[in-house]
């Protein structure tokens, strides 16, 4: 599948890596002819910013802050790994990037709508620290307008994703205020409630909070249902079902989880997209749903179904390595080592995100297959993208003495590798 | 892939900081040796033989080493990041015009071995009109200038255009018989005539002149390591003449002489670095000779001997990879090439490319694509990796990689 056959020419990204081409929008702000669905967050974000439109098509997936750094390292484009969007050297700035940089420079003087759309785009590009620097959730009243509520949401969201990577503090109180106090009838109330629901389930394992926010979100959806197009209804309810299925999951109610996910999947698939952008939104919503379904299937002891759903997720988003890595994990658990390897190899070819994991898991497969030299090479590759990775360093430390067995002359090299990773692990400790 | 950047940094420290690196990398030792020669006048103007591409530092930067400022000129390293030795090097460059001739020669040689050929050429060029080839140090400066021209010319032209050997020929024509500069100029001319021009008569003529020159110099240094170094070098280079005639026995005889003299040089002066370095170069040549002759067991042994001398040198592992590859030991060859990639330049693109070729021949398509893509990532101007990758992607129906290569090649991605 090729998204974006009608888009404008893309400025060249001078990188010899395939994944850098696929993710070129993170460098140029111009969409490429083939790109993973998460990259459309940047494209739609740019359109929202330039059109001053808060209700542009939304891409749900939020990339972690480390994604940008890893992408730049992988692409051999360290010059793009800047702290702030406007710090990108002039010579590297595309016309679109210059527009963004200009808005960032004038951020304090922008109206709330422009601030919100600019913050959204900065976050989409991975500049979460910059969003944190530019915004103050305490200084924004989410009840003032939808634009205020959205700006507050992006401000809090940036802090949350940074918090997940150990960078700064986070309190869900601000998000709660957005859900409860944003103007009635705005979808940002639902977004905040679903975000709180997922956080309560994943981070805090708080069933009461999950129940509360599921109920809250459902009421909000019902309140605006009459204003939604059939497409919007399907997508929103599909999203809701995927998130709210945490409630029966935490209660161990398999049948209810299945029923909710069945409906979520059905709506995700049938949502009648009326334009190309809606089709991208549909696929982008379907992709995580299918991934969730595969986890559900594994939970239910049905790896055959899990494999089917992951294959569908791959078909929905062929340029995203994530479902390939998940498929690799599933196949590995089924002892289908060669097939798992093929999936990890494909993920590696696609580049970030998840590249260190794909490298590490491929290394693990090679180790299992009795090919330590290849295992060592893939572990070192994992470390090249994520130098702080403990697992590949530990495996490499254990593996390096075995390398000498391959050639009697390899001893000095394997000793050096061993001492290198040992020092690295000591530093990490 | 890039995971061993720290290892590469440690190995290549002599070339990036002029400080001791990990033991086991001959080129690093050669750089430190040559830098030490800038401090004290050499009685004998013989230098480290190891040659390195002027693009070597670019390759190190691609491996992830932060040398952007010092790719073309050591003075690009900010003051705060210079080691004391690096500061000394920069000060010598700044003071070039005021240095005595012997020091200018040593500095030019140090710069060349550190892959600063362009800078060495610019510095020696300034003196070219005032040099007298009858003076050994002046002739050495002319030689350095001529060698830099050769290196830079062939790297720019991709070895596809003829080279004008006039600068080196002038040294030969205008220096006395017993001149070290003449000896090395003849050495380079023989290599040029044998490998590039493929003019057997000219190579043979220069080989005879080099033999006269070597004997005259050896006579002056009888019984020392220098005598054996000269003779070892002579036989190694003049073996190119029987090589051009496809005379295998002739090559083997010359190389046996070269090896005997290499061993004798080490025996005469075990502490002489040049003797160790010469032995290394000889092992390298013997590996290639054995591959050429088709004695692949001997080639493998010679390559392993080379690795024992310099285990952290990627080039040595590439030699082993080649010997194993030619022997049809593809899996082992791939492992040798992968080991080379852990150590860093030189030859990273070749090591990745050959690992990919090995796995391709073994029918392991994912691994083949993986290493071919790594080769392409390391040097996207070298077409071999892209061509091999295209073949394998097309044959496996990998539209993703095929489409990407097409877009790269035609530049039409933006218009798709």
Image (cartoon, coloured by chain):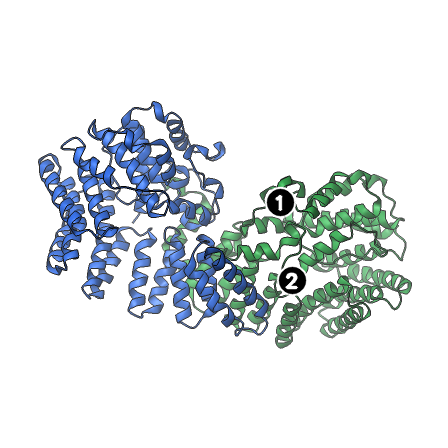
Chain colours: A blue, B green
Q: Is residue A192 left or right of residue A384?
A: left
Mark seen at residue B71? 1
Give the camera-side residue of B171 and A98.
Answer: A98
- Using the image, name the chain to which the residue with label 1 belongs: B
Q: Which label's residue is closer to the chain start, 1 or 2?
A: 2
Q: Helix or strand or loop: what does disc 1 sit on?
A: loop
- The image's mark for residue B373 is none
Q: Position of residue B261 (x, y in %)?
A: 79, 70
Query: Which residue is nearer to you in this view: B249 or B349?
Result: B349
- The answer to whether residue A272 is visible is no
Q: Residues within 10 Å of mark 2 (few under 14, many from 20)?
A: some
Q: Is residue A237 visible?
A: yes
Do the residues at pointers 1 and 2 share their chain? yes
In the picture, the quarter occupied by the C terminus of chain A is bottom left
Kindly state the secondary structure of the residue where label 2 is placed. loop
Q: Give the number of the mark in front: 1 or 2.
A: 2
Residue pointed to by mark 2: B23
Residue A296 horizontal side relative to residue B7, left or right: left
């Amino acid at each position: 599948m090729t998204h974006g056959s009608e888009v404008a020419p893309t400025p060249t990204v001078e990188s010899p890596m395939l994944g850098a081409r696929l993710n070129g929008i993170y460098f140029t702000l111009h969409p490429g002819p083939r790109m993973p669905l998460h990259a459309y967050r940047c494209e739609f974000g740019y359109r929202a910013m330039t059109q001053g439109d808060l209700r542009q098509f939304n891409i749900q997936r939020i990339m972690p802050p480390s994604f940008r750094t890893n992408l730049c390292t992988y692409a051999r484009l360290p010059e793009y790994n800047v702290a702030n969007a406007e710090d990108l050297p002039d010579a590297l700035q595309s016309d679109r990037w210059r527009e963004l940089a200009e808005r960032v420079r004038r951020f304090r003087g922008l109206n709330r709508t422009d601030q919100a759309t600019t913050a959204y785009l900065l976050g989409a590009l991975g500049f979460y620290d910059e969003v944190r620097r530019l915004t103050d959730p305490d200084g924004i009243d989410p009840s003032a307008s939808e634009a205020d509520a959205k700006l507050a949401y992006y401000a809090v969201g940036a802090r949350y994703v940074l918090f997940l990577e150990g960078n700064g503090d986070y309190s869900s109180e601000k998000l709660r205020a957005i859900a409860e106090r944003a103007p009635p009838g705005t979808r940002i109330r639902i977004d905040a409630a679903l975000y709180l629901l997922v956080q309560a389930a994943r981070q805090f394992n708080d069933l009461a909070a999950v129940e509360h926010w599921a109920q809250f979100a459902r009421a909000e959806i019902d309140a605006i249902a009459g204003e939604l197009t059939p497409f919007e209804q399907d997508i929103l309810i599909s999203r809701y079902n995927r998130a709210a299925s945490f409630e029966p999951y935490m209660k161990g109610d398999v049948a209810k989880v299945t029923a909710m996910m069945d409906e979520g999947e059905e709506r995700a698939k049938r949502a009648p997209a009326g334009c190309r952008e809606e089709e991208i939104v549909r696929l982008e919503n379907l992709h995580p749903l299918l991934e969730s379904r595969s986890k559900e299937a594994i939970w239910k002891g049905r790896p055959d179904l899990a494999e089917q759903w992951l294959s569908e997720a791959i078909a929905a988003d062929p340029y995203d390595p994530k479902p390939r890595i998940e498929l690799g994990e599933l196949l590995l658990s089924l002892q289908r080592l060669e097939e798992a390897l093929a999936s990890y190899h494909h993920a590696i070819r696609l580049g970030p995100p998840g590249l260190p994991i794909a490298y590490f898991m491929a290394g693990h497969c090679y180790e299992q297959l009795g090919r330590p030299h290849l295992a060592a090479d893939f572990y070192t590759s994992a470390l090249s993208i994520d130098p702080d990775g403990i697992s590949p360093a530990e495996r490499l430390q254990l593996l390096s003495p075995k390398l000498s067995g391959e050639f009697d002359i390899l001893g000095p090299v394997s000793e050096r590798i061993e001492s290198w990773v040992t020092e690295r692990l000591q530093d990490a400790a | 892939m890039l995971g061993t950047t720290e290892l590469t940094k440690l190995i290549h420290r002599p070339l990036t900081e002029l400080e001791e690196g990990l033991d086991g990398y001959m080129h690093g030792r050669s750089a430190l040796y040559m830098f030490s020669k800038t401090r004290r006048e050499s009685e004998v103007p013989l230098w480290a033989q190891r040659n390195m591409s002027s693009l070597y530092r670019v390759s190190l930067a691609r491996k992830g080493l932060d040398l952007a400022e010092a790719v073309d000129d050591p003075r690009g390293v900010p003051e705060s990041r210079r080691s004391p030795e690096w500061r000394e090097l920069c000060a010598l460059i700044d003071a070039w015009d005021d240095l005595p001739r012997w020091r200018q020669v040593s500095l030019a040689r140090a710069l060349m071995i550190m892959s600063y050929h362009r800078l060495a050429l610019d510095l020696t060029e300034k003196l070219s009109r005032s040099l007298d080839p009858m003076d050994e140090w002046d002739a050495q400066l002319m030689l350095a200038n001529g060698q830099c021209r050769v290196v830079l010319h062939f790297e720019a032209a991709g070895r596809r255009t003829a080279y004008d050997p006039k600068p080196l020929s002038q040294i030969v024509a205008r220096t006395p018989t017993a001149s070290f500069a003449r000896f090395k100029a003849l050495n380079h001319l023989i290599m040029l005539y044998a490998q590039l021009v493929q003019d057997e008569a000219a190579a043979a003529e220069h080989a005879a002149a080099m033999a006269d020159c070597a004997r005259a110099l050896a006579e002056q240094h009888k019984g020392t390591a220098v005598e054996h170094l000269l003779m070892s070098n002579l036989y190694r280079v003049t073996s190119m003449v029987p090589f051009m005639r496809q005379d295998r026995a002739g090559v083997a005889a010359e190389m046996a002489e070269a090896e005997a003299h290499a061993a004798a040089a080490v025996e005469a002066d075990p502490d002489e670095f040049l003797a160790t370095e010469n032995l290394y170069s000889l092992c390298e040549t013997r590996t290639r000779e054995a591959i050429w002759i088709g004695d692949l067991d001997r080639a493998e042994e010679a390559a392993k001997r080379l690795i024992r001398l310099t285990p952290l040198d990627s080039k040595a592992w590439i030699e082993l990879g080649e010997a194993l590859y030619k022997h049809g030991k593809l899996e082992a060859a791939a492992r040798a090439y992968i080991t080379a990639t852990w150590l860093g330049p030189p030859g990273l693109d070749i090591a990745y490319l050959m690992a990919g070729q090995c796995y391709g021949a073994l029918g392991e398509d994912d691994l083949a694509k993986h290493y071919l893509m790594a080769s392409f990532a390391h040097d996207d101007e070298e077409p071999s990796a892209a061509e091999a990758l295209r073949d394998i992607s097309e044959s496996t129906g990998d539209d993703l990689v095929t489409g990407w290569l097409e877009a790269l090649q035609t530049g039409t991605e933006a218009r798709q």
